Image (tube, rainbow, N blue to C red):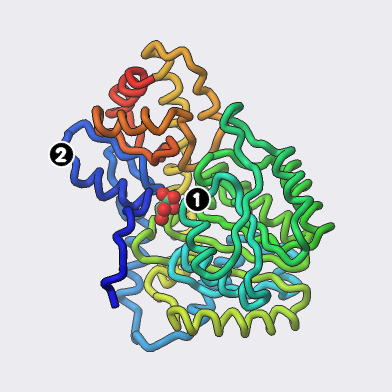
Amino acid sequence: MFASLKALPADPILGLLAKYREDTNPHKIDLGVGVYKNEAGETTVLNCVKKAEQHRTDTETSKVYIGPTGSSLFNSEMANLIFGQDHKVLAENRARTVSTPGGTGALRVAAEFIKSCKAGATIWVSSPTWANHTGLFEAAGLTVKTYPYYDHENKNLDFDGMLAALKQVSSDDAVLLHACCHNPSGMDLNQEQWQQVADVAKSIGFTPVVDMAYQGFGQGLDQDAFGLRLMADSVQEMIVCSSCSKNFGLYRERIGACTIIGETSLKVDIANSVLLSVVRVIYSMPPAHGAALVETILSSDELRNEWHSELAQMRNRINGNRQLIVDKLVENGVTRDFSFITRQAGMFSFLGITPEQVQRLQDEFSIYMVGSSRMSIAGIANSNVDYLAKSIAKVL
Ligand code: LMR
């Protein structure tokens, strides 16, 4: 059976990580995968997570199955985090959340759910988008189309192009939007632009699918959810896929959530029964460990406050790195304007260099970024920024 198979290339993001790990150059820099690193280049376990883990070890009494929905405490804490406690979709009991294996699991569940609503449905994604979105949706049987988003030439949002494309979408299509910290461009919609997109969604009636993988990494937990909350205010049906990988640093624990919003409480219960049947045939039930840590942190005033301050530290370091690299490039005589990096948000920006220049950075300087020149800003540190800026100056 396996004889007909042809080897596939490594995943563009995960393959890069493997290459970086094998590289023995002491000056190597990892600007590839979207993982937070501290000043020392380490991805450590958050203190609030360590405490929640200790609590779990001390208090857990059973490993028995929970069920396809996952932990109800985790689900309700996540709904509060996503929408804010007073949001009308919660007051009207129109949201249902399931725990999922990471944000990718949430997206796959959402895709299978959309397919249950309409076989072969179309989902529109931004151009560009996270490298895994297209493959993931197509693997679930959806048709993927793109709308304009990032203007590479002007290093800005192509908002007119985006809005014009969204006005052509059918009412029974889905549209994927990044809640914040757009991956890969770092270019987010402002509040007024979110309002315009929400108005189009409402008037056409397409289903927004909002991917929130980086809540808290842009401007703050509430600010980063602004567009999503506005959208949920405006439309009758919507899907939210969220991840706890980055903001809780729980990458390998695989914990995220898929939330559906329905027109009424009754209708969303029907939709939820379909969502649960989707879960049952993919992985049956979600992993419990990460969910237990997140619910422990979010339901304790002390741990939640500690998490807020650890998250703010990560966010502030990344934002500081944006200015740092722009200044160092100028210091190293680079005349091209890279100041757009400071106007973007979250883990990523496109450097805007050619694939050949990206390859030279890798081959000659052991600096790893995705071929599109997407840089993970978290990999920059005071200790490597001079070397990075000098190397970029050399390949330009
Ligand atoms: C990324 O975009 O680098 C992250 O979301 C990690 C991944 O799974 O691709």
Disc 1 marks a residue whose amino acid type is: Trp
Q: Is residue 354 above or below residue 73?
A: above
Where residue 303 appears, as percent x and y from the top left, is 44, 60
- Give the x, y percent position of residue 264: 77, 77
Category of crowding for the residue at label 1, using alpha-carbon neighbours closer than 10 angstroms: few (below 14), some (14–19), many (at least 20): some
Instruction: Report the residue that reaches farthest toward the front.
Output: 4
Quadrant placement of the C terminus: top left
Residue, x 64% and y 56% (percent of image)?
124
Classify 368 as above or below 284. Answer: above
Give the residue displayed 35% in from the left and 73% down from the top.
56
Residue indicated by mark 1: 130
Tell me the residue at 63%/78% (across/down): 116
Which residue occupies the foreground of this view, 129 or 265? 129
Above-or-below relation of 250 to 161: below
Q: Where does residue 94 sit, x and y in percent of width and height?
A: 72, 74
* Element under disc 2: loop
Disc 2 target residue: 24
Circle 2 residues within 10 Å: few <14, some 14–19, many ≥20: few
First-in-chain label (2 vs 1): 2
The amino acid beneath tag 2 is Thr
Query: Does 91 appear above or below 382?
Result: below
Query: Quick check: 19 left or right of 369?
Result: left
Residue at (75, 56) in percent of width and height: 169
- Disc 1: residue Cβ within 8 A of ligand 1's nearest atom: yes
